Image: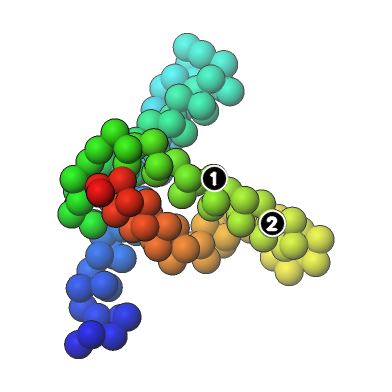
Amino acid sequence: MSSVLSKEFILRFFKFACIGGLNTLLTYALYYILSFYLSYQISFLISYIAGIVISYVLNSKVVFKQKRTLKGIFLYPLVYIVQYGVSALLLHFIIVTHVIDPKIAPLIITILLLPLTYILSKVFINLGAR
């Protein structure tokens, strides 16, 4: 089956989503622990950067099976810059049009953007491995 929804693609996407969930739990735990010792902004910055590194390491190895490189670790944050920009635009649209409750909108946006984040991750991990 060579379609976009091949068994291999579905398995990779499932792994990607699971790694994202695990990464969210790990970075939240790190943020929570750090917040007892540091300001919330510093705690958030450290945990956010750690989340990008964890995501890069796990996705490159487990999901896309690519070697990790210095080039890759510097390219990979671009995934999150693009994701943030698209998320911010969607959030603004949702809030202005009252389509979804603003309290749950970020969660819905995150789920909706999973395919985009997957594609961007694949592209930047592959570029970094070259």
Q: Would residue 112 be found to the left or right of residue 25 on screen?
A: right
From the viewer's perspective, is the residue at label 2 or at label 1 nearer?
Answer: 1
Q: Nearer the viewer, residue 11 or 80?
A: 80
SS for callout 2:
helix
Q: Quadrant of residue 57?
A: top left
The CA span between labels 2 and 1 is 13 Å
The answer, for residue 118, to whether it is visible in the render is yes
The residue under the point 58% across, 23% down is 41
* Viewer-side residue, 45 vs 120: 120
Residue 110 x, y percent position in the rendering: 52, 57
Q: Amino acid at mark 2?
A: Leu
**SS class, disc 1:** helix
The residue sitting at the front extreme is: 130
Which numbered tag is attached to residue 81? 1
**What residue does disc 2 label?**
89
**Type of the residue with mark 1:** Ile
- Residue at image coords 25%, 47%: 129
